[in-house]
Amino acid sequence: MTTRKPKPLMVKMPDCPVVFCLPYPMLTLSAYAEVTGQTVRTVQQQANENRLTISKKKRGKEREVNMVYEFLVAYEEAQEALRMKV
């Protein structure tokens, strides 16, 4: 069985001239833990407490974090911080 590489997602924000490329729009909990430097158990607890946006679970598959939503939340927080600074 071959593994498919996910297609990167391009995100264009209306108030920003930059186009953002998200190479992995969805990450499994274990991959997310590795990327963020957290333990898998910590990430599972965050998912259980609804602090992470999880895609709909399919039977027999590991839960996946919606990285597009996480990016949009981080982008909005950064924009708000810039507005507060000015």
Image (spheres, rainbow, N blue to C red):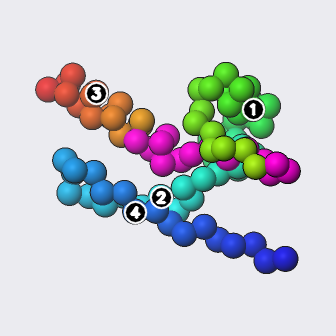
Q: Position of residue 61 (x, y in %)?
A: 80, 51
Disc 1, SS: helix
Mark 4 or 3: the one toward you: 4
Q: Is residue 58 magenta?
A: no
Tell me the amino acid under the disc marked 3: Ala
Q: Residue at x 37, y 57 (%)?
A: 11
- Left or right of 21? Residue 32 is right
Three-letter amino acid code at the position of disc 2: Leu
In the foreground, 60 or 3:
60
* Residue at the spot 40% in from the left edge and 62% down from the top edge: 10
Is residue 63 covered in magenta?
A: yes
Q: Which residue in the protein does label 2 denote?
A: 22
In which quadrant will I find the C terminus? top left
Comparing 61 with 51, the one in front is: 61
In contact (CB < 8 Å): disc 2 and disc 1: no
Q: Residue at x 57, y 45 (%)?
A: 66
Q: Which mark is residue 81?
A: 3
Q: Earlier in the sequence, mark 4 or mark 2?
A: 4
Q: Amino acid at mark 4?
A: Met
Disc 4, disc 2: CB below 8 Å?
A: yes
Distance CA(mark 4)–CA(mark 2): 6 Å
